[in-house]
Image (cartoon, rainbow, N blue to C red):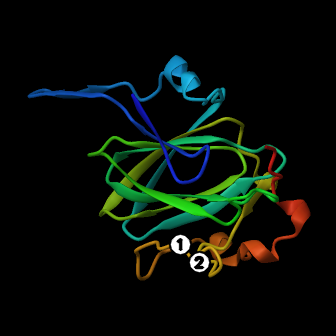
């Protein structure tokens, strides 16, 4: 596996070695010891699978009391995957990074605790898979407005399809400080 640092410290792009032949391909999508050497020491306790159509935008989500680190990949299709630092006091708060994850490039994105996460589907449909370091708790679910002008994410999607919940989130600057994760250097 090749581990690549992004412009946000702690957010990592992971490119597995893919062995292809006329039968198809093989790759390791998770190898604890290699990821631990790169600083990913989370114990992942939950796997999620999201199937979405072109233009569906999910996010920007984070958890407060039970924060989740996420290891994301796409098995089929293509998404633009986004991580936003929302940690109060972080030197990078409000900064974002994007990567294209697809069934073709096999890349993965590691999103640490304290970051909001979202993605938009760029293909006809996409199967988005992600490991979480803590269990989902609906009462702990938080979010940032997907098109917060201060963050300025370029989703490269003219008319995204969003859930009612995702449309109602506030911009980062309007979220009460006690509802944001804290930066711990």
In-image side of 126 versus 39 (left or right): left
The x, y position of residue 56, in whole percent, is: 46, 68
In contact (CB < 8 Å): disc 1 and disc 2? yes
Relative to residue 177, is residue 117 depicted above or below?
Answer: above
Image quadrant where one finds the C terminus:
top right
Query: For the view shown, which residue lies furthest in the top direction?
Result: 33
Could you tell me how far apart the alpha carbons at marks 1 and 2 are, in whole angstroms? 7 Å
Which x, y percent locates residue 95? 62, 64
Q: Nearer the viewer, residue 139 or 172?
A: 172
Seen as rendered, the residue at the extreme right is 178
Mark nearest the camera among 1 and 2 is 1
Q: Earlier in the sequence, mark 1 or mark 2?
A: 2
Question: Would you say 78 lies left or right of 96 here?
Answer: left
The tally of labels here is 2
Residue lying at 57% horizontally and 62% vertically, measured from the top left = 96
Quadrant in which the N terminus appears: top left
The disc placed on residue 147 is 2
The label number, if any, that marks residue 153 in the structure image: 1
User: Which residue is found at the position 84% from the left and 47% from the top?
Assistant: 65
- Rate crowding at label 1 as few (under 14), some (14 to 19) or many (20 or more) other CA atoms within 10 Å: some
Query: On screen, 53 above or below 11?
Result: below
> Element at badge 1?
loop
| Residue occupying the point 8% across, 28% down | 22
Q: Position of residue 171 (x, y in %)?
A: 72, 76
Residue 40 image-quadrant placement: top right
Q: Is residue 57 above or below residue 25?
A: below
Q: Quadrant of residue 17?
A: top left
């Amino acid at each position: 596996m090749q581990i690549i640092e992004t412009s946000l410290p702690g957010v990592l792009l992971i490119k597995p070695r893919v062995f292809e032949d006329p039968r198809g391909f093989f790759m390791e999508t998770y190898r604890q010891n290699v990821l631990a050497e790169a600083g990913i020491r989370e114990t992942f306790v939950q796997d999620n699978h999201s199937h979405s159509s072109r233009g569906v935008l999910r996010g920007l989500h984070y958890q407060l009391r039970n924060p989740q680190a996420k290891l994301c990949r796409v098995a089929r299709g293509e998404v633009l995957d986004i991580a936003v630092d929302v940690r109060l006091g972080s030197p990078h708060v409000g900064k974002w990074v994007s990567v294209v994850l697809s069934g073709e490039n096999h890349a993965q994105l590691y999103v640490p605790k304290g970051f909001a996460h979202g993605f938009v589907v760029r293909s006809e449909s996409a199967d988005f898979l992600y490991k979480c370091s803590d269990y989902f708790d609906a009462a702990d679910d938080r979010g940032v407005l997907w098109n917060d002008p201060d963050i300025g994410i370029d989703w490269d999607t003219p008319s995204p399809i969003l859930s009612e919940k995702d449309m109602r989130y506030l911009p980062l600057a309007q979220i009460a400080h006690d509802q944001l994760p804290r930066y711990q250097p």
